[in-house]
């Protein structure tokens, strides 16, 4: 066996999402052959790659079938998170992907989705930050159990930078960490925009694979400020199944699809999709039954209408709500049933981000005239 033999065999293994073979994509490194033992490293597009097992099995089969059926094949993995930020400039220079989580209206669980998305990514080995951009109604400091904490400052060449709070492996920044919870933020648009710009330029985010931005509901000043300040990789839209939520979600999708913005929509996730009485019954038949309290498949149908990927359904679970209230999100709990829905959603989101980076030109900072 030679290195060329191995590479030729692996040229028949396609990356499932990108549609090209591993060798063409330069994803195979460090081929070592000792007798019948073969080892090599596959460089994944993200630590959170949901296709790792599929790629591993395909590589082993390719070598055994096309080179040597007696070969003992070891496939190692590393990752280099895909990014299409060719020139990150000075703002968030170390951040590979900026993902905005948006909704057309409040109350659909957008912050819960953003928090658990960030935690699921970090749980798979990615470096993740979470920016709570909902200035008027911040909630991430509550969900992460850091109420009352204050971020530190550091000196960076004479400029003071805010050091994000770190919790559960996430770098977190929220206006809720800077103000008294009993005080309302009564600011006009320019003050809010200034605060958001400071969250970008005056916070030491460092090197990140993903910066998740928990956006406020609606389509207003903060959304415009974000896309005018940094090149957003893409947005994830959160909705619930009922008609009124879907009507507002359409506005969110339309905002980022209009000619002035052209920010790619990674996909749509449907929260509060159904209820199963898993926590309240020992009868397996009852536990498996789904009750569609807010309607069925509204998010899936909306995704089909706008021809955007449907990223998954998150059920209504008491543990999900309780986790956010007590500062221990479900992705860092021991509730495997609730975690599974977020893991599946995150896997689909990661695939969407990787495909977006491979197939769509870099998102530019926008100049919006409104």
Image (cartoon, helix red, strand yellow):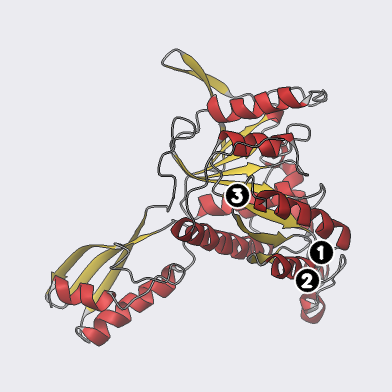
Which of the 4 image quarters holds residue 172? top right
Q: Earlier in the sequence, mark 3 or mark 1?
A: 1
Q: Which quadrant is the N terminus positioned in?
A: bottom left
Q: Residues within 10 Å of mark 1 (few under 14, many from 20)?
A: many
How far is the residue under mark 3 from the one under mark 1?
A: 24 Å
Which of the 4 image quarters holds residue 22? bottom left
Q: Is residue 43 left or right of residue 329?
A: left
Where residue 182 sits: x, y (%)? 83, 24
Q: Is residue 308 visible?
A: yes
Q: Residue visible at 88% across and 67% down?
A: 293
Q: Earlier in the sequence, mark 2 or mark 3?
A: 3
Q: In this figure, which residue is indicated by the disc labeled 3?
A: 263
Q: Is residue 316 left or right of residue 51?
A: right
- Front: mark 2 or 3: 3
How far is the residue under mark 2 from the one under mark 1?
A: 6 Å
The answer to the question of whether label 2 and label 1 lie on touching residues, with beta carbons closer than 8 A, is yes
Where residue 280 sits: x, y (%)? 83, 67
Q: Residues within 10 Å of mark 3 (few under 14, many from 20)?
A: many
State whether residue 305 is above or below residue 45.
Answer: below
Name the foreground residue: 195 vs 49. Answer: 195
Q: In this figure, which residue is indicated by the disc labeled 1?
A: 241
| Secondary-structure class at tag 2 | loop
The answer to the question of whether label 2 and label 3 lie on touching residues, with beta carbons closer than 8 A, is no
Q: Which quadrant is the C terminus positioned in?
A: top right
């Amino acid at each position: 066996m030679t290195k060329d033999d191995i590479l030729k065999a692996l040229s028949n293994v396609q990356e499932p999402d990108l549609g090209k073979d591993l060798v063409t994509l330069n994803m195979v490194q460090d081929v070592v052959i000792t007798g019948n033992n073969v080892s090599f490293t596959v460089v994944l597009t993200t630590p959170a790659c949901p296709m790792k097992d599929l790629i591993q099995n395909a590589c082993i089969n390719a070598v055994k079938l096309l080179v040597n059926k007696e070969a003992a094949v070891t496939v190692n993995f590393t990752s280099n998170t895909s990014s299409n930020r060719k020139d990150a400039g000075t703002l968030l220079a170390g951040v590979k992907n900026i993902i905005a989580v948006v909704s057309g209206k409040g109350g659909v669980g957008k912050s819960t989705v953003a928090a658990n998305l960030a935690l699921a990514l970090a749980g798979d080995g990615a470096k993740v930050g979470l920016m709570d951009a909902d200035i008027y109604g911040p909630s991430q400091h509550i969900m992460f159990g850091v109420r009352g904490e204050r971020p530190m400052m550091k000196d960076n060449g004479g400029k003071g930078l805010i050091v994000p709070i770190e919790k559960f492996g996430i770098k977190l920044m929220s206006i809720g960490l800077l103000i008294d919870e009993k005080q309302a933020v009564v600011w006009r648009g320019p003050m809010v925009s200034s605060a958001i710009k400071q969250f970008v330029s005056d916070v030491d985010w460092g090197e990140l694979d993903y910066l998740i931005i928990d956006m406020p509901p609606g389509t207003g000043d903060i959304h415009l400020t974000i896309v005018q300040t940094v090149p957003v990789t893409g947005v994830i839209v959160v909705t619930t199944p009922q008609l009124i939520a879907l009507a507002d979600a359409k506005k969110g999708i339309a905002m980022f699809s209009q000619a002035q913005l052209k920010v790619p929509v990674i996909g749509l996730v449907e929260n509060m999709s159904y209820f199963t009485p898993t926590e309240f019954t020992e009868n397996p038949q009852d536990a498996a039954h789904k009750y569609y309290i807010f309607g069925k498949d509204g998010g899936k149908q909306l995704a089909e209408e706008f021809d955007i990927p449907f990223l998954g359904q998150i059920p209504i679970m008491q543990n999900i709500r309780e986790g956010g209230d007590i500062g221990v999100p479900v992705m860092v709990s021991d509730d495997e049933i609730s975690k599974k829905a977020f893991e599946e959603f995150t896997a689909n989101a990661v695939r969407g981000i990787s495909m977006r980076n491979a197939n769509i030109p870099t998102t530019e900072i926008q100049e919006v005239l409104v």
